[in-house]
């Protein structure tokens, strides 16, 4: 297995599917800082709050010249419903079932809950600089206050 990218490394440029059925990849945002926040599942309490928080601050990210992208393995059609239900402003993308961006970053991993073992997304946020290199990583994110903390860090780039 290849080395998992960290701060200072190039962010993997792996394409994902947009809710509309198009394609998006990190290099599409070249020349501006990018925040990629990975979350486990649409329509769950923590993930909904995280998406709402990033959406509420999207205007501030835009003003700072920072792109936003939320990523889970949910299919595009589920993302469409999630966006509509909560009027989300932060763009979302669907990571591939296997061999996707979250796999390359090592954040699609085995998890345990109530004695059950399953594959799942570790809530992680990446701040990628204009040069495509990872500037900062937040691992095992706690949702409360997270979007505002990321915004402050992004403004510092």
Image (cartoon, helix red, strand yellow):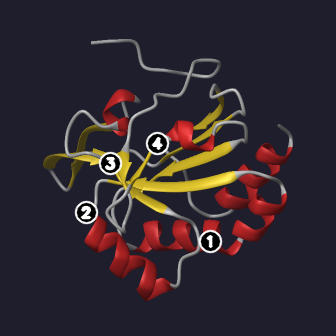
The residue that disc 4 covers is: 25
Mark 2–mark 3 distance (CA, rounded to whole Å) = 8 Å
Q: Residue furthest top?
A: 2
Residue in the image at 64% along x and 37% along y: 30
Q: Which residue is mark 2?
A: 75
Nearest to viewer (mark 1 / mark 4): 4
Q: CA distance from mark 3 to mark 1?
A: 20 Å
In depth, the one of 42 and 83 nearer the eye is 83
52 or 61: nearer the eye?
Answer: 61
Q: Residues within 10 Å of mark 3 (few under 14, many from 20)?
A: many
State the image coordinates of residue 95 (x, y, percent, origin top left): 32, 48
**Left or right relative to 95: residue 5:** right
Comparing labels 3 and 4, the label whose residue is closer to the camera: 4
Q: Earlier in the sequence, mark 3 or mark 1?
A: 1
N-terminal label among 3 and 4: 4
- 126 left or right, relative to 73: right
| Helix, strand or loop for disc 1 | helix
Q: Residue 55 in the image: state x and y as whole percent.
A: 62, 71
Total label count? 4
SS label for mark 4: loop
The residue that label 3 is drawn on is: 95
Q: Return the disc, 1 or 2, that comes first in the chain's sequence.
A: 1
């Amino acid at each position: 297995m290849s080395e998992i990218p960290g701060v200072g490394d190039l962010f993997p440029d792996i394409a994902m599917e947009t809710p509309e059925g198009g394609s998006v990849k990190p290099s599409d945002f070249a020349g501006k800082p990018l925040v990629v926040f990975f979350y486990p599942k649409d329509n769950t309490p923590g993930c909904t709050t995280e998406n709402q928080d990033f959406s509420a601050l999207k205007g501030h990210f835009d003003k700072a010249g920072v792109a936003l992208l939320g990523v889970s393995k949910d299919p595009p059609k589920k993302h469409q419903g999630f966006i509509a239900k909560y009027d989300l402003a932060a763009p979302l993308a669907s990571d591939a079932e296997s061999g996707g961006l979250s796999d390359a970053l090592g954040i699609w991993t085995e998890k345990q809950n109530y004695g059950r073992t399953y594959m799942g997304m570790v809530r992680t946020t990446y701040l990628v600089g204009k040069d495509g290199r990872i500037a900062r990583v937040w691992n095992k994110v706690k949702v409360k206050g997270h979007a505002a903390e990321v915004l402050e860090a992004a403004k510092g780039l």
